[in-house]
Image (cartoon, rainbow, N blue to C red):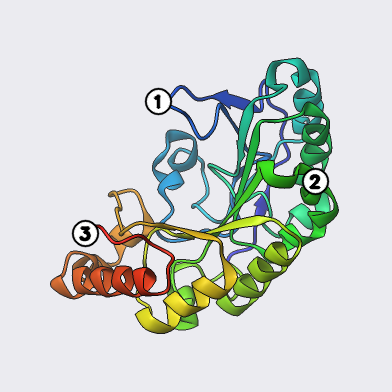
Amino acid sequence: MPSLHIDETSVRSVLVPQNPPGEPITEYTLNPYSGCGMGCAYCYVMKFPFAYEYPKAWGEWVQPKMNAPFLLGKARAKIYGRKIFMGSATDPYQYIERKYRLSRRCLKVLVDCNLKALTVHTRSHLILDDLDLLTQFGSRLRVGFSVPTNDDRVRKRTEPKAPKIGVRLKAMKQLREAGIHVTASLAPVLYCQPRQFAEQIAEAADGVYFGKMDYTDRTGIASMPKARRYFNSLTYRELIAELKAELINVGMLKSEK
């Protein structure tokens, strides 16, 4: 695999306001890094201009936002009592977090902001490094954990630099044991063993977010002809239906009837 290009940078702002209709799940997104060393083939972020205009391929570069904690500290008054989503366009616990600790330093700021809600989205067990801070948010915290398959053969093809599935499931259980609400993000659903997968999710998560593959021409999946055919096939639609039924059986999804 190509080595990871690390491009330390400073930014003007680290918060992006969100204005969705209705009751929003977040009011600001926060991404301590630009780019992502995980490089998942289906990642929707690679279709954004900042990603496809970067001179290196998605997954081969990361820009640590070195002044992110400082800027967040300056914005304390603005985000006091608000809803924050960390990890909307990067994984805040990708491997270089062990070096830079930007996500941890941002959490230290957020702990004192009396947030109404904090959502952290990741696919990495390194989130456990910050368990001491995460538990301070109590019921205001939700961790979304990306687990698109329970088959490591599939993971190796689509997200080879991401942690193994068993490692993720174990981390999810540890978060729950610490009293943290965990949502399994099955988005997109990849090839899996539906019954076993549903049972594994039921053991590791409090809830589930479920979605089918929805790629664009700029994602890595688009360059895999066999994968494109599969995700457009009846076989894939049947897999989705079977997994949904199994998730209903184990109480992770509500029946639509």
- The amino acid on which the numbered mark 3 sits, given as a three-letter code, is Lys
**Left or right: where 145 falls relative to 216:** right
Give the percent coordinates (x, y) of residue 164.
59, 76
Residue assigned mark 2: 104
Screen quadrant of the C terminus: bottom left
Q: Residue at the front extreme?
A: 257
Q: Quadrant of the N terminus?
A: bottom right
Rendered position, 65 above or below 82: below
Task: Give the residue pinned by disc 3.
Answer: 257
The residue under the point 80% across, 46% down is 104
Chain-order first, disc 2 or disc 1: 1
Q: Which residue is at 50% across, 71% downward?
A: 201
Q: CA distance from mark 2 to mark 3?
A: 43 Å
The quarter of the displayed image where residue 103 is located: top right
Instruction: Kindly indicate whether the residue at mark 3 contacts the one at mark 2 (C-beta within 8 angstroms).
Output: no
Is 50 above or below relative to 172?
A: above
**Lower sequence index among marks 3 and 1:** 1
Among the 4 quarters of the image, the one containing residue 149: bottom left
Residue labelled with disc 1: 22
Residue 7, percent from left and from top: 69, 43
Q: Is residue 216 left or right of residue 158?
A: left
- Packing grade of label 3 (10 A; few <14, some 14-19, many >=20) is few
Instruction: Say which label, 2 or 3, has the lower sequence index.
Output: 2
- 248 left or right, relative to 37: left
Give amino acid for label 1: Gly
Q: Give yes or no for contact between labels 3 and 1 (Cβ–Cβ under 8 Å).
A: no
Identify the element where label 3 is drawn: loop
**Mark 2 or 1: the one toward you:** 1
User: How many other residues sit within 10 Å of disc 2, few (<14), some (14-19) or many (≥20)?
Assistant: many
